Amino acid sequence: MLDQQGSPAINTRVSSSNKPPINVMKWALGCAGVGMMLCTGAIMFSLIVAPALFRSLDSDLQFRIVRRFPFLASLQDRPTPPFKALPAVGATSANALALLSTPVNTPTASSTRTSTPAGDNSSAGMPPVQPSGTGRSVLSTDTPVAAGVIASPTEVFAPQPTATLVPTRVEPPTATAVPLPVSFHATGYKWVPQTWNNCGPANLTQALEPFGWQQDQKVAAAFLKPNKEDKNVSPWQMVEFVNQKTNLKALMRVAGDLPLIKRLITQRFSVILETGYNVANEGWMGHYLTVIGYDDNLRVFYGLDTYLGADADNQGYKEPVDDLDERWQQFNRLYMVIYPKEREGELAAILGPDADLTYNAQHALSVARAEATYKPNNQFAWFNMGSSYTLLGQYKEAATAFDQASSVGGGLPFRMLWYQFGPYEAYYNVGNYANVMALVNATLQTTTYVEETYYWRGMVSAAQGNKDKAIEDFKRVLQFNPNFLPAAEKLSEVQAGNFKAPAIAQANQ
């Protein structure tokens, strides 16, 4: 090619061979430096920023994420509890040991007890509501059960030395005393994974489904715990929900045993147990379990556990018999039964004398005494004695038993008064307001989301004549849970000037 003057064209491009060579070492070091910076940033984010962001999320959202991605559980906000056991409010006492040899009334079914109104709240450790019925129904569906009574040893345990204290269960009529199958699985149930703090409503949803209930756990939760941070839904509240909001009936009893539970589920009644449960990195908590089957050969019960699951085949989470009974003892071996109203007679026949509330409380007391005699350092046995005495209105004996429960066996778990409130009721009714307040203040160090704590603080203030403080606490309870009717009743009494302190407390003032 020639230019206009006929001279050869000059190539103005610079040859690539003229570029400076790439320094591989510097390039590698640079990349490594950038990579280290990114890794450091990622580590810092995962160690500092991510946990902070995760913990800033709503508690319910945190719970949902962890259920899907369990490895994130370590990021959840877990405040360190100020203590592992509730403070002892009474020293080990010879009076407590004397209770074990004090004669008790022989458990007998009452023939005069009247039915109680729906929502009877003494099961929450509240002063009993006066019966409103004028005649005795086949079953009272609102068992006044303080959360602390246990039941007889199960069939798998060897007889205890003090077994003579335990009333013998009266066999149901011949029509229901049929041999139990070696194994059984109920049908019609579907596992419901609980949302945040929603064990109670989720179990109710599971237990109602075989009877045609088609709502989800949000419906029960809206009534039982309007505030999702509520740490506990008591059995009496769950019974109240069924009796008021569905066309079914429910009751609860204590002094249960595993053969009875087998009989109930084989007869197609829905059964929910209240048990203790140790959660990894969390400690002891209360938990509900919907029981749907058992296998004597494997020595297991099958339950729909709203927290742990229902196993891969949806046949139920396997609960070893010994372990289940030990954890059930921690909650009085309390059980709830859901049933169609027309089957009330069948249920009464299966329960036998335990259908009667007075017999049931006396039965539980005799069993608790037997277990405390056999193992004097079993704090749950003593707690159950206290709760049983509370049910029977024997508050002085109840207070002595609760003193012992807080002093032996390492004391009571710090969450005990999140779920069971018998000590409040007993100490209150003997005028020991100092013990009530000591337990209230200890519990408030662990959570502010249990309405019963403020209820009992309000009761003490009202009994001491501190009207304004009592009104403040009762209103606080109702703001937290408008359906907590005991607080509404006491608020009305205080405002009207009709509140009465316990008679024994008045005598001591």
Image (cartoon, grey):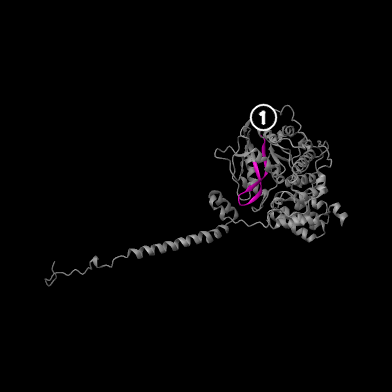
Whether residue 368 is in magenta: the answer is no
Q: Amino acid at mark 1?
A: Leu
418 or 406, nearer to the observer? 406
Q: Residue furthest left?
A: 6
Whether residue 288 is in magenta: the answer is yes
* Helix, strand or loop for the magenta stretch, by majority: strand
Q: Secondary structure at mark 1?
A: loop
The answer to whether residue 160 is visible is yes
* Residue 245 falls left or right of residue 394: left
Q: Is residue 68 above or below residue 176?
A: below
Residue name at image x 55 percent, y 37 percent: 313
The answer to whether residue 120 is visible is no
| Segment colored magenta | 268-289
Figure quadrant of residue 478:
bottom right
Q: What residue is pinned by disc 1?
A: 180
Looking at the rendered structure, the number of numbered marks drawn on it comes to 1
Q: Is residue 4 above or below residue 237?
A: below
Q: Residue furthest bottom?
A: 5
**Residue 424 image position (x, y, % from top left):** 77, 52
250 or 262, nearer to the observer? 262
Rendered-image quadrant of the C terminus: bottom right
**Residue 500 image position (x, y, % from top left):** 84, 53
Q: Residue furthest right?
A: 507
**Residue 431 image position (x, y, % from top left):** 83, 54
153 or 221, nearer to the observer? 153
Q: 10 Å neighbourhood of mark 1: few (<14), some, or many (≥20)?
A: few
Q: Is residue 191 above or below residue 55?
A: above
**Residue 97 image position (x, y, % from top left):** 80, 46
